[in-house]
Image (tube, rainbow, N blue to C red):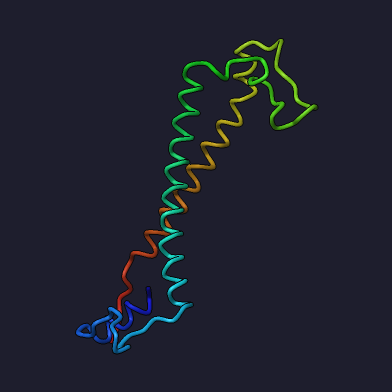
C-alpha cells in the first residue's frame, strides 16, 4: 500500500490499475502483502468487537449477580488450590485494609496521567528557530 502512495505522490497522473499492456504489474509478494493488509484490518476489527461484547456481557453478569457465589468471591481463580475466602472480617476491617491500596492506585494513576500530559505538551511546543 505504501508503494501505491509513493507512486501516486510522485506521479498523480499515473494510472495504477493493472492493464493488459503491463503498464503497472504487481508481483505475487505484493499481492500477498495487500491481501494480508485487508485480512489484518478485518481481524483487528473483529477482535475489537469481540472484546467490547465480552466486556458488556461480563458487566451484565456481574450486575445480575451471577458472580455472587462463594466460589466466585474467593481467589481460587488466581491462586488455585491455595486460594482462600474472607469469612470473619466485617466491612470496616476490609475498608481499612483496602484504603492504602486505593490511595496508592489513585496516586499512581494521577502521576502517570501528569507525566503523559507533560510529554504531550513538550512534544507540541514549537521551538523558536533563529535563522
The x and y percentages for residue 1 are 37, 73
Q: Position of residue 42 (x, y in %)?
A: 41, 54
> Quick one: quadrant of the C terminus?
bottom left
Reply above or below: 110 against 80.
below
Percent coordinates x, y for residue 62 in the rendering = 51, 22
Q: Quadrant of residue 37?
A: bottom left
Outermost residue toward the front in this view: 20
In this orientation, which residue lies closer to the viewer: 18 or 47? 18
Residue drawn at the location 64% of the way across and 21% of the way down: 72
Q: Is residue 31 left or right of residue 92?
A: left
**What residue is shown at x 45% (from left), y 53% (from top)?**
44
* Left or right of residue 109: residue 131: left
Count the labels in the image: 0
From this view, report whether residue 71 is shown above or below residue 27. Answer: above
| Residue 101 image offset from top left, x and y in percent | 60, 31
Between 22 and 40, which is closer to the camera in this rendering? Answer: 22
The residue positioned farthest toward the left in the image shown: 13
Q: Residue at x 54, y 42 (%)?
A: 108
Is 105 situated above or below 85?
below
Amino acid at each position: 500500500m505504501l508503494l501505491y502512495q509513493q507512486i501516486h505522490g510522485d506521479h498523480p497522473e499515473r494510472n495504477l490499475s493493472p492493464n493488459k499492456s503491463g503498464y503497472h504489474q504487481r508481483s505475487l509478494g505484493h499481492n500477498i502483502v495487500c491481501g494480508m493488509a485487508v485480512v489484518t484490518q478485518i481481524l483487528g476489527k473483529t477482535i475489537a468487537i469481540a472484546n467490547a461484547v465480552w466486556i458488556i456481557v461480563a458487566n451484565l453478569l456481574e450486575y445480575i449477580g451471577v458472580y455472587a457465589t462463594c466460589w466466585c468471591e474467593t481467589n481460587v481463580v488466581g491462586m488455585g488450590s491455595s486460594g482462600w475466602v474472607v469469612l470473619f472480617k466485617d466491612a470496616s476491617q476490609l475498608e481499612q485494609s483496602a484504603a492504602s491500596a486505593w490511595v496508592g492506585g489513585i496516586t499512581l494513576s494521577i502521576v502517570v496521567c501528569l507525566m503523559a500530559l507533560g510529554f504531550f505538551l513538550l512534544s507540541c511546543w514549537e521551538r523558536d528557530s533563529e535563522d
